[in-house]
Amino acid sequence: MTHFQFDVPTERFNEVGQKLGTSVVADVGRRVFDYYYDREIED
């Protein structure tokens, strides 16, 4: 397993979290990563 973290502006995070239906930081990060992976890696 790999752990990573990074900073983003709070307003942008809140907008993404609202769209995803969660404000839990770990959930937002995982779902954004999975979204990218599903579209760019797993064709």
Image: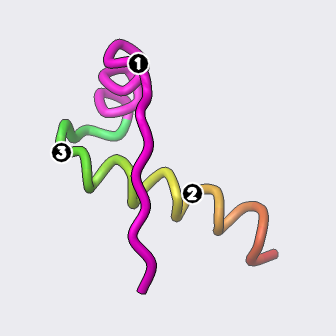
Residue 16 vs residue 43: left or right? left
Which is nearer the eye, 43 or 28?
A: 28
The residue furthest bottom is 1
Q: Rate crowding at label 3 as few (under 14), some (14 to 19) or many (20 or more) other CA atoms within 10 Å.
A: few
Magenta-colored stretch includes residue 4 = yes
Name the residue rendered at 40%, 52% in the picture.
5
- Are the residues tagged 3 and 1 within 8 Å (C-beta)? no
- Tell me the residue that label 2 is attached to: 35
- Tell me the residue that label 1 is attached to: 9
Magenta stretch: give its range: 1-19
Question: Does 11 sit above or below residue 4?
Answer: above
Disc number lying in front (1 or 2): 1
Circle 1: residue type: Pro
Q: Rate crowding at label 1 as few (under 14), some (14 to 19) or many (20 or more) other CA atoms within 10 Å.
A: few
User: Is label 2 in a helix, a strand or a loop?
Assistant: helix
Circle 2: residue type: Tyr
Disc number lying in front (3 or 1): 1
User: Is label 3 in a helix, a strand or a loop?
Assistant: loop
Name the residue rendered at 74%, 77% in the picture.
42
Q: Which mark is residue 24?
A: 3
Residue 17 image-quadrant placement: top left
Name the residue rendered at 76%, 72% in the picture.
41
Name the residue rendered at 41%, 30% in the picture.
16
Disc number lying in front (2 or 3): 3
Which is nearer the eye, 43 or 4?
A: 4
Percent x, y of residue 30: 39, 60
Percent x, y of residue 34: 52, 64
| Colour basis | rainbow
Q: CA distance from mark 2 to mark 3?
A: 16 Å
Question: Does 16 sit above or below residue 12?
Answer: below
